[in-house]
């Protein structure tokens, strides 16, 4: 099996049922509407699951495409689903153009993020800086990392545990709004923070 994107897959191995060797069901990824895909590969073929509750059963080495639903998954796998870790929470902090300062509408998120971290023992924050496509790639990489570091410092000043915060800079590689090179897009000046 090769998972891709943002998805959860429930796999079931069955030794009592000789021909059925594997079952994979693609579950919805969470409240943000994102869904990834899972490729189920066996000796006699491959199937890509890319819709909620799409299912593949591998029978005698042959993957078969099936469909499940929420009530069936809950009935059969309910105890396993309860044991899943919570989905990461994602916060997007928009920035004032040309600065590392949160835009006024985003500044209220800082307290919410610090409270969410404090209320989730064992969780950590990943702070990722982003830029638009104006300027050289290397400069945007440095700028995005500087933005992430500045946000980390703001979170620590607001009471977040420094040991639970890591940073990364993605430069212009993951735009919120895809543009041509050289286009200034304010929505791409942002920080994404994941509580996981």
Image (tube, helix red, strand yellow):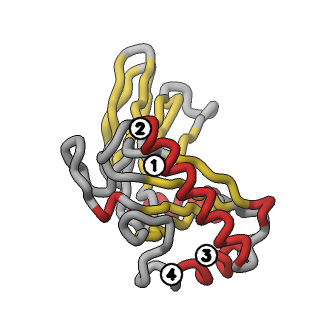
Q: Which residue is mark 4?
A: 107
Q: Is the residue marked by circle 1 packed among few (<14), some (14-19), or many (20+) residues within 10 Å? A: some
Q: Quadrant of residue 30?
A: bottom left
Q: Which sits earlier in the primary sequence, circle 2 or circle 3? A: 2
Q: Is residue 54 above or below residue 102?
A: above
Q: Position of residue 72 (x, y in %)?
A: 44, 60
Alpha carbon separation for disc pair 4 and 2: 37 Å
Label located before the other in sequence (4 or 2): 2
Tell me which label, 4 or 3, sits earlier in the chain: 4
Q: Which residue is mark 3?
A: 113
**Which one is nearer the viewer's eye here, 184 or 36?**
184
Which residue in the structure is indicated by mark 2?
38
Dot 3 falls on a residue whose secondary structure is helix
Mark found first going from the N terminus, 1 or 4: 1
The answer to whether marks 2 and 1 mark residues whose Cβ atoms lie closer than 8 Å is yes
Residue visible at 42% across and 69% down? 95
Closer to the eye: label 1 or 3: 3
Residue beneath label 1, please?
7
Q: Earlier in the sequence, mark 1 or mark 3?
A: 1
Who's the residue at 49% across and 61% down the image?
192
Q: Is residue 132 left or right of residue 164?
A: left
Please give the name of the residue rendered at 63% of the width and 31% of the height, measured from the top-left corner.
15
Tell which circle, 2 or 1, labels the residue nearer the N-terminal end.
1
Q: Nearer the viewer, residue 5 or 56?
A: 5
Side (left or right) of 38 relative to 114: left
Residue 189 can be seen, yes or no: yes
Secondary structure found at label 4 = loop
| Quarter containing the C terminus | bottom right
Q: Which is closer to the viewer, label 2 or label 3?
A: 3
Badge 3 crowding class, 10 Å Cα cut-off, few under 14, some 14 to 19, many 20 or more, is: many
Whether pointer 1 and pointer 4 mark residues with C-beta atoms closer than 8 Å, the reply is no
């Amino acid at each position: 099996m090769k998972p891709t994107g943002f998805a959860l897959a429930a796999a079931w191995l069955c030794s009592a049922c000789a021909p059925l060797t594997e079952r994979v069901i693609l579950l919805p990824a969470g409240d943000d509407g994102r869904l990834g895909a899972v490729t189920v590969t066996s000796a006699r073929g491959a199937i890509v699951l890319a819709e909620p509750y799409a299912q593949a059963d591998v029978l005698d080495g042959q993957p078969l495409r099936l469909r499940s639903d929420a009530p069936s998954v809950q009935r059969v796998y309910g105890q396993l689903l309860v044991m899943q870790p919570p989905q990461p929470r994602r916060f997007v902090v928009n920035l004032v153009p040309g600065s590392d300062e949160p835009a006024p509408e985003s500044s209220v998120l800082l307290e919410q993020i610090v409270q969410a971290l404090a209320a989730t023992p064992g969780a950590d924050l990943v702070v990722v800086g982003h830029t638009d496509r104006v300027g050289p790639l290397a400069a945007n990489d440095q700028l995005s990392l500087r933005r992430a570091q500045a946000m980390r410092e703001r979170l620590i000043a607001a009471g977040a545990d420094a040991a639970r915060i890591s940073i990364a800079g993605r430069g212009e590689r993951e735009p919120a709004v895809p543009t041509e090179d050289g286009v200034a897009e304010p929505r791409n000046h942002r920080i994404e923070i994941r509580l996981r």
